[in-house]
Image (tube, rainbow, N blue to C red):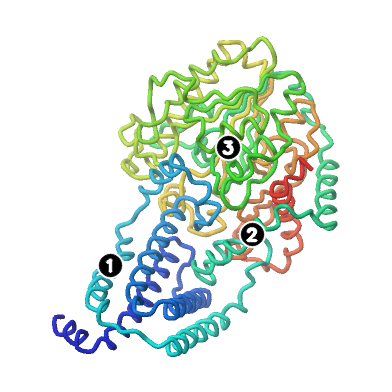
Amino acid sequence: MLQVVRDIKDNPHYGEAFYWIFFIFAILIKCIYFQFTTNINNEPYFSFTNLMMTISTFAIILMICAFIALVFNKKRIQALFVTNILLTALLIADTNFFRYYYDVITIPVFSNLDSRIMNSINQSISSLINVADIIFIIDFPVMVAGLIVLKNRVGEIQFYKRTIRSLVLLLVGVLTFLSVYGKVEITAFAYSNNYSAQNLGVFYSHFYSTKLFIREKLSEDDDITYEEKEMIKNMFETKNKERTGGRYSGIAEGKNLIIVQMEAIQSFIIGRTINGKEITPNLNKFINESIYFDNIYYQTAGGNTSDAEFLCNTSLYPVAEGAVYYRFYENTYHSLPKVLKEKGYDTYAFHGYDEVFWNRNVMYETLGFDKYISEKDYELDEFVGWHGEALSDMSFFRQSFDKIDTNKPFYGFFVTLSCHHPFDYFEDYDFDVGELQGTYLGNYIKAAHYADKCIGYFIDELKRRDLFDDTLLVLYGDHKAIPIVNAEELYEFLGLEEREDIWAKLQKVPLMIKYPNQNTPEVISRIGGQIDILPTISNMMGFDFPYALGKDLLNTDKEYAIFRNGTIVTDEYVYINCSRNVYDYSDGTMLDLELFEEEISSYLKELRVSDLIITKDLFKK
């Protein structure tokens, strides 16, 4: 090793060549590690898709080198070192963000982050770091040693020579990239960061998502085209013709409305036992008092919990990048609380955390809530979940009742908190999970059992206060609990095969609706999503809501759910947007995409319409 250092000192040209080559392959290896550790790319390793991704990533690294070679002269070694650090930091952030959110970081995500959100994300994703992630920094000793040895030994290069070197690198990079770019349809159907990353690498995904963001910002003030206007008009006309009322129409008219958004409660735990004990005994009991929709999918994106709130209260999709609560809080929206206020209801939003988290203090007012009851309005007497920093759901529910004026009709929107990722707070919670003790899934099951206990208390208290039979009560889960990095634990627990279509079908959340004086329970297995909650409520409460993109789950023969990332689940097939694969819903066999292209494009128009309404603030115009 010492001899190598001496040789480099004696002939820095060889050392510099080695440093450039080492930089290129160090970054390439880190990128490939990101692609596979996140499961964006999978075996077989030498598949056509994986080879395209590798070639594209290599080509983009060459283009980065071309820029460094041209701009930096004597400081080029330092520039390579700093670039290595910056790209490594980006890849580390991408890796851990992806493990939780199943997406790469984009500019809107960065722009939405305040200190509280960052703290929340850090707590959530820090538990997902793997030992193998050391690969991101294993090259640093060589990079540091090379920097020390070479920084004062490389000389200046004449401009024309630098230009030739840069142009050669750029030309090779561009030609190499173009050799694979034409084989991928990035913009087919709905754009997917994951699809572009899978085929052309994470660096290209960052480039293209940034390009889309800039294009969107530049066109925000532009008027919509005639074609876009007609598309929106036809969409709502079609939706309103489909919502004609029927079953349960007006059954809760004039009654109170209570919606409980349950943090990270997914459907796979409902009705399931472990070591002979029910995981969710109270929700299981409530199924026998309500209408249970057991085929409902969450449709959230980067806004997570806040996206679920938005879906439920507006029947619009969240934006694809970042959180609508941060990016478009000044918009005008048609919403559930606004409609009920017009009918004389008091409208309340309840959440036992900091009022500015997810910009709720602003967005709840935008949505039309009269009062927002937040952490500052509660006595912080018990902390359960989320590293012991969250007001317990039990205390949250107990204190919330006295904050409602029950002498007139009201809408209460409750957002729970204790069952928030990460779930390691519950590792010592008294519920036997057997061999899952100490695992991610085991801790989640314990957290869900605690959350269920609190829901049971809430329902019992509604009965004790004579509100149960005078209220339309809605319970639903907000988003995933199990990130894809922990998918293997879930597959094994449920005895399922690891497949992308099965993973999509696991992204279900429970939806339970109990109408006043209901005596007969019902289970409805129609496929739907959180966007369908508001139209279903509007039918049961007897009011019209003409600007909903969802369907009335009680009176439709359509079965589909559109994920925000463009994946679609219907009763016939599952379309995975990040891979462009289509699977038979029943048996999982691969189907021919061309047979479903027209229908898939029709479904995805809903996302386009929602995006236009939000980004152009069309309800204000």
Which mark is nearer the camera, 3 or 1?
Answer: 1
Of the residues under marks 2 and 1, which one precedes in the sequence?
Answer: 1
Task: Work out which quarter of the rendered image holds the N terminus and state it.
Answer: bottom left
Residue that mark 1 sits on:
138
Mark 2 residue type? Tyr
- The answer to whether residue 80 shows anywhere in this view is yes
Residue 70: image x %, image y %? 45, 80
Please name the residue shown 42% across and 61% down the image: 90
Quadrant in which residue 408 is drawn:
top right
Mark 1 residue type? Ile
Of the residues under marks 3 and 1, which one precedes in the sequence?
Answer: 1
**Above or below for 116 versus 50:** above
Residue that mark 3 sits on:
510
Residue 575 circle label: 2
**Above or below for 380 versus 226:** above
Mark 3 residue type? Pro
- The answer to whether residue 583 shows anywhere in this view is no
Residue 166: image x %, image y %? 46, 84
